[in-house]
Image (cartoon, coloured by chain):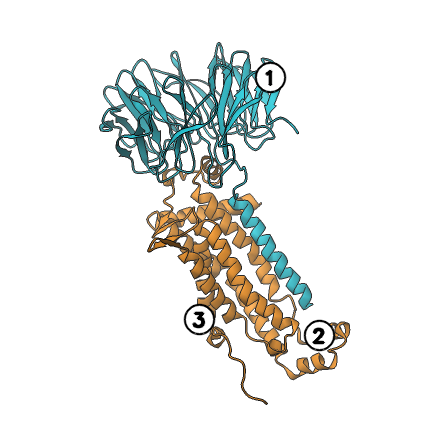
Chain colours: A orange, B cyan
Amino acid sequence: MWDTFITLMITVMLYIYNLVGQNFGWAIIIFTVLVRIVTYPLTARQMKSSKAMQELQNSKKWADIQKKYKNDKEALAQKQMEIYKEMGISPFGSCLPLLIQFPVIIGLYQAIIRTLAVTPIQLVNLSKHISNGATLIPINSQFWWMELSEPERFPIMGVAVPILAILVVITSYIQTKMITPPTQGAGDGGQGAQMTKMMSLYMPFFMGYLALTFASGLGLYFVATNLATIAQYVLTGQADFKNILPKLPSRSMG
Amino acid sequence: MKTMKKYLLILLLALLALTLGACAGGRRVVATGWSEITLKEDVAYFSYGPQVYALNIKNGTQKWLFPVETETGVDFFAAPVFADNGTQLIIASYNSNLYSIDPTNGRENWSFTAAENRYVAAPLVIDQGIFAPSSDNKLYAIDLNGMPLWEPFETEDPIWASPAWSESCGCIYLASMDHFLYAINPETGSQVWKSEDLGGPIVSRPAVSDSGLIIVSTFNNEVIALDEVKHTIEWRFNTTDWAWASPVIDGEQVYASDLSGTFYALELATGDLIWQLQPGGGIVSAPLVQDDLIYFSTDASSLVVVSKDGVVQRNLPMEGKLYASPASAGETLLLAPSEAEYYLIALNQNGTQIWGYPPAE
C-alpha cells in the first residue's frame, strides 16, 4: 500500500522532471505546488476550524468561563467541551487535516530521496518503482548552486553559509505567524498562548535543522510548501501580516 | 485538552524527525552499495560501510581494519584492488578519495584527493597505472605514488563501472551512465574511439572476448556486443529488465542477467539465447564460473548454483541481500551479504557455513 503510494509519487515526479527539461529542482517545486492544490480541501477545512476556534477564544463567553473556573481545571475542561459541542466545533478540527497531510509529507520526502538515487542500492530500489524510466537515469540533481542529494551550503567569502536552511526558517516563521492568529490569552501566559508561542518559535528552527542536516531536496520542498501555504492564505484573504512582526509590550496602564 | 494537543504536537515532531532520519540513513553502517571480494593467498579483502577488512580465509579472523577508527563521511563500497606487484592495495571511497594501503598491515601509503564525488567502482590497475572512475563523471589516471598521469578523462554522466583493459586494442574500455562506451589510450588519456549511443546507462564493467567483442549490459534492457575493430554493434539481446551486472564470457557463451532476476546464457558470436532461468530476486553482480558450475547471487537472499546447461543444482537461502558476486578460494566459497548479521561468510562445498564475520558476540 505504502509502496504503491510512493511509486505513484515517484512516477508523477519523474513525469514532471522530464516535462521541465530534466531539472529535478523544478520538479520538486512543481510537484509540491500540485500536492498543495490536491490537498487544498484539507487545508481549507483546517483554516475554517482555526478561524472558528479563534472566534470562540476571543468571545466573551469563553473569557467568562476561563475566569469562572480558573481554579478548577477539570470543570473548565468540561465546560469548554460543552461549548465546543454547542457551537459545533471540533477541538481537533485543525489537527486532523494536519494529521492526514503527514503521510503526504513523508511520502513526498521519500519520493524525492528515492528518485535522486545517488548510490547503487538506492538505484536498485528506484528501479522497482519505475518501469520505463531508464532513459531518465541518472537524475540531474544539480539545481542552481545546490546538489539536491546533499545538505546545502553556499560559499560566501570562504564561509559555507546554509542559505536554504535560513530560507526554511524564515518562510516557516512567516507561515506559522501568518496562520496562527493571536488568542485572547496570549498575554496572560495561558496554555493556549504557550502552545502558540512554542509552535511559532520552535517549529521554524526544527524545520531549519532538518534542512541543514538532510538532503537539500527536502529543504527545497520545505521552502516551496511554505511559500505555497502563504500564497493560499493570501489568496483567500486570511493572511494576517500584522502577526509577522513581534509585538512590542503595551505601554498603556489600562 | 490543550495539554493533549501539546503532547500531540511534540509526538508529531518526534515522529517526523525519526521518519526523515530513517529515510536519510545518517552515518551508521547502512549499506548503500556493495563490494566484491578480493582474494590473495590466504586473505580476503572487502569493503563494507566505514571500513575495509582483511580477513583470514581459513577461519575468518581479522588481520586488520582500515581505517582503524571510523570517520564520519567515509564509506567504502568498492572492491580493493592490488597494485605494484601486490605491495599496494588500492581502495576507492565514497568520500572522493583513493587510498593506497599496505596489504600486510592496513597502513596508509598515500591518498589521492582530486575527485569531486564518490567512487562507486573499483579502479583498474594495469602496467600503465591506476585508473579510477568517479561519480564526478571523470576517469582519473594516477601512478603508483598517487600522482596524476594525465588530465582526467571526462564523460557526460557519473561513472559507476570499473574500466576494462583490452590487450588486443591496447586501450581501456570505459562505460558511463551517459550511454556511451569509450576506448581510451592509457598512456595519454586521449579517446581512441567512442561507441554510438547504447540506449541506456551502463554501470558495470564491459567484458572483452579474445575474438574481439566487447559485451556491455545496459539499463535499456539490453546486452550489446560491439566489435573492437569495426566499432560497430554486432548483436543486441533484449532482457526483461535493466541489465546491471557485468556480462561474463565463458568459452563460446556469455552469461548475463537483469534486475527481474532472469539469468541468461547467450551465444557469444551471435547473442542467441541458449537457456534462461529465473530463480527469483534481482541480479546485480556477475556470476562466478568455476569448473562446470555457475554461481550467482540474488537480492532475494539466495545463492544459486547452476550447471552450464542451465540446470539448477542448488538454491541456497542466505541471510541478508546478496548484491556482490560470490568469490572462490579453493574449497571455500565467500559471500558478502548486505543487511545481514555477518558482513562476510564462508561456506564449504555443501553450502554449510564455516564462519561468519564479525563473529557472533
Residue B268 image position (x, y, % from top left): 36, 16
Please state which of residues A61 and B151 is positioned toward the viewer in this rendering: B151
Residue A221 image position (x, y, % from top left): 45, 55
**Foreground disc of the pair 3, 2:** 2
User: The residue tagged with tag 3: helix, strand or loop?
Assistant: helix
**Foreground disc of the pair 2, 1:** 1
* Same chain letter for marks 2 and 1: no
User: The residue tagged with tag 2: helix, strand or loop?
Assistant: helix
Amino acid carrying mark 1 in the image:
Gly
- Observer able to see residue B206: no
Residue B214 image position (x, y, % from top left): 32, 21
Amino acid carrying mark 3 in the image:
Leu
Please state which of residues B255 and B82 is positioned toward the viewer in this rendering: B82
For disc 1, the marked residue is B351
Amino acid carrying mark 2 in the image:
Gln
Asked whether the residues under the numbered discs 3 and 1 touch, taking CB atoms below 8 Å apart as contact, a structural biologist would say: no
User: The residue tagged with tag 1: helix, strand or loop?
Assistant: loop
For disc 3, the marked residue is A235
Q: Is residue B111 left or right of residue A201?
A: left
Alpha-carbon span between mark 2 and mark 1: 69 Å
Q: Earlier in the sequence, mark 3 or mark 2?
A: 2
Alpha-carbon span between mark 3 and mark 1: 68 Å
Residue B133 image position (x, y, % from top left): 35, 31
* Same chain letter for marks 3 and 1: no
Q: Is residue B163 left or right of residue B289?
A: left
Please state which of residues B312 and B123 is positioned toward the viewer in this rendering: B123
**Residue in the picture at 45% in, 55% down:** A219
For disc 2, the marked residue is A80
In the displayed structure, B122 sits above or below A110; it is above
